[in-house]
Image (tube, rainbow, N blue to C red):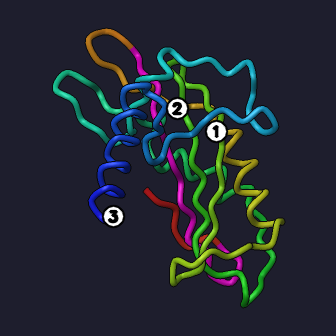
Amino acid sequence: MKYSIIIFALLLFRSSLAQNKYIDVGDIQFNTSTDNVNFKMCDENNIKQYYSRYSSDNPAGYKGEKRNMEKPFLQNYKYPISKTQNGYITIRFIVNCYGESDRFRVEEMDFSYQSKKFNSKISSQLLNITKQLKNWIPRNGNGQNYDFYQYLTFKIKDGQIIKILP
């Protein structure tokens, strides 16, 4: 019985690979209720990670580097001071080959990495500021721009941003 379950699982996995219906961990699938239908990518089947380094690629980035990317958060974020608003808020998204961003996803957790719901005044502000960032530099290699996954993680203490990663 044990071997038949293992064989069944392997056949199911093999079948899903053959049909190319599996999703890589971390993929951001299009969601009609939250994503921009006009957001276009060069190759939805070849979205790279911002940090990956390929032999001839220039890495993705932000014009003016991290310091310029952080400025809108430091200038515009108005945090409600609260001793209960502690942890991490991660916003994942895709930057297309034109330097535009969409498919934003938010994950919130406490300092023990357990799921947590932050005050919406905090998470919605961070999401809105992230959506307004317009100076993304797409990955480039062999004279071609590529789409890439990006994330920003905000370390929040008492409602205040104390660090922006990466």
- Give me the residue at 38% from left, 38% from top: 49
Task: Tell me: residue 154, above or below residue 19.
Answer: below
Residue 30 in which image quadrant: top right
Which residue was labeled with disc 3?
1
In the figure, is residue 67 to the left or right of 89?
left
Q: Residues within 10 Å of mark 3 (few under 14, many from 20)?
A: few
Residue 136's label in the rendered image is: 2
Magenta stretch in the rendered image: 145-160
The Cα–Cα distance between marks 1 and 2, rounded to whole angstroms, is 7 Å
* Residue at the image point whose x is 31% and y is 46% from the top: 10
- Element assignment for label 1: loop
The residue at the far top in this view is: 143
Image depth: mark 2 or mark 3 in front: 3
The reply to whether dot 2 and dot 3 touch (C-beta < 8 Å) is no
Query: Vertically, is 41 above or below 107?
Result: above
Could you say whether the residue bearing mark 3 is in a helix, strand or loop? loop
Q: Quadrant of the C terminus?
A: bottom left
Residue 77 image position (x, y, % from top left) = 74, 61
- How many numbered callouts? 3
Alpha carbon distance from label 3 to label 1 = 55 Å
Predominant SS along the magenta part? strand
Three-letter amino acid code at disc 2?
Trp
Q: Decide which of tag 2 and tag 3 comes sooner along the chain.
A: 3
Q: In the picture shown, does residue 17 fall above or below 40?
A: below
Q: Which residue is mark 1?
A: 133
Residue at 33 percent of width and 64 percent of height: 1
Disc 1 to disc 2: CB gap under 8 Å: yes
**Which sits in the foreground, 27 or 93?**
27
